[in-house]
Image (cartoon, rainbow, N blue to C red):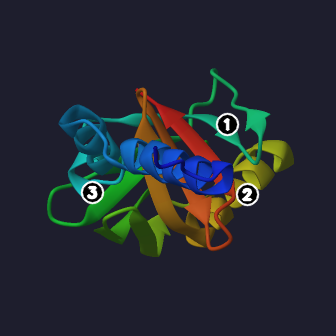
Amino acid sequence: MLQTPPRLLATLLLALLLTGCSSQPAWVEAERRAQTDPASLRTGTWVCVSMAGQGADPDQPLTLEFAPDGGVSGHSGVNRFAGSCSAGTGRLEFGALASTKMGASPERMDRERRYLEALASVRGFSVQGGLLRLNDGGGRTVLEFSH
């Protein structure tokens, strides 16, 4: 009777397990693609729920809307803004944003400045469970939005 050495048997079992783990059901692959599909951005108004890990103020919402033509607009707390963006699979970058010039308290103006700076730092995105996460060049989440 032919006997298989234990080390070879363990290696074969590990290879079988890893092979089984690498093939995903079609629905898992479809969900993964949807998380980074630029079309998932154009689903209405996104409302900021977190900026730099801190919760948002529901009384002064920060918003973001993506247009099919590559335009972007929203409310930055005090002013409205509009501009352009470039999006690809999991990739997002905002162009120059123009805004209205209304004033408010120093605290609200500082919050608006931080929001617009965060948008300028964005280089990627993902959408999962109704939550849009915008990431900087280092992959850190700088803004989170919900509908």
Outermost residue toward the top? 59
Image mark for residue 67: none
- Residue labelled with disc 2: 114
- Residue labelled with disc 1: 50
User: Eyeballing the image, is 8 above or below 133?
Assistant: below
Outermost residue toward the right? 106
Q: Secondary structure at mark 1?
A: strand
Amino acid type, callout 3 = Pro
User: Eyeballing the image, is 88 above or below 30?
Assistant: below
Amino acid type, callout 2 = Arg
Amino acid type, callout 1 = Ser
Q: What is the x, y in percent for residue 84?
A: 33, 71
Disc 3 crowd rating (10 Å Cα; few below 14, some 14-19, many 20+) is many
Horizontal relation, residue 120 to residue 21: left or right: right
User: Eyeballing the image, is 53 above or below 129?
Assistant: below
Depth check, mark 2 against mark 3: the one in front is 3
